[in-house]
Amino acid sequence: MYVRFLPALSDNYIFLLHNFKNKTAVVVDPAEYDVIINCLNKLGIRLTAILNTHHHQDHIGANKKLIEHFPHISVYGSEQDKGRIPGQNHYLKEGDQFNFAGKNAEIFFIPGHTNGHIAYYFPPSSNQKIGELFCGDTLFASGCGRLFEGTASQMYKSLMKLRNLPDTTRVWCSHEYTLNNLKFALTIEKNNHNLLLRYNKAISTRKNNKATIPSFLKEEKETNPFLRCDSQSLQEIMGINDPVKVFQKIRELKDNFN
């Protein structure tokens, strides 16, 4: 399984999982139809499934046209999103699995950004130490999604679930928000050396018009304030010793950060 990421809209990423052996693919959060079809045609591969993380338009925008093009396609999403994802015919819950290219993805229920948000996690295989996490708008590079439908407690619990994955997990988030997220993170932890190094690296990456994702979970644990709410240093900075309240305060500050 090879992961291709396709820039879409203004700052979205679509992920195409490519099985070389049988020339098939599945797409995660298809935002734009033309971007996907052009890639499939160029590679000469067939789409067999859509994996939606949640119901927002910039993650399901191409569902209807893809279903018209591939009438027998499988469309996966959360059981909580029934009726909100076009063409959905598979309803997933925590602990379910999705198989592709001989790999089983584990389904995590991670509400907070929306009530039905899920993630797809492909654990490392016996001959590869890297896992692949497709987390939509829950976990970003040095950030996390806004609380549109869920609570701070739900989102923090969801993020901790993802934080428990191995450090070698690659985080495929759905937006190029990294520079702004890092700028904000530095207003919280200005003395975090790893954070400053990451910020400078991201500036160079974006100047060269390259993507800042995927990141590794180890990097997120070191530099993402939303994954560090239980750290003593961050709690001292915020003057709060409850991780959920620390998260809530940081999320409020980020919501008002330009």
Image (cartoon, grey):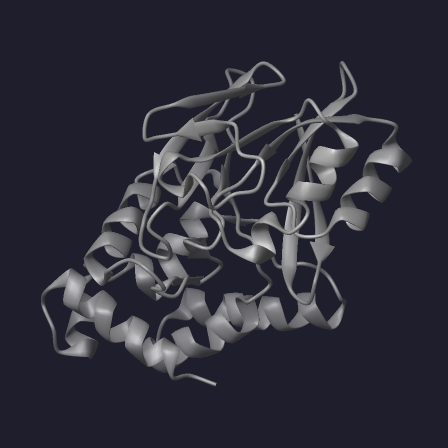
- In this picture, residue 117 sits left or right of residue 136: left
Specify whether residue 190 is in view: no
Q: Residue at x 76, y 14 (%)?
A: 21
Q: Residue at x 43, y 22 (%)?
A: 97
Q: Position of residue 44 (x, y in %)?
A: 88, 28
- In this picture, residue 254 sits left or right of residue 52: left
Q: Position of residue 33 (x, y in %)?
A: 75, 47
Q: Residue at x 57, y 51 (%)?
A: 59
Give the mark count.
Answer: 0
Residue 163 or residue 97, whichever sits in front: 97
Specify whether residue 151 is in view: yes
| The N terminus - image quarter | top right
Q: Position of residue 99 (x, y in %)?
A: 53, 18
Residue 193 or residue 149, whichever sits in front: 149
Specify the quadrant of the image occupied by residue 106.
Answer: top left
Q: Residue at x 61, y 34 (%)?
A: 50
Q: Is residue 107 above or below residue 156?
A: above
Q: Is residue 99 above or below residue 181?
A: above
The residue furthest left is 241
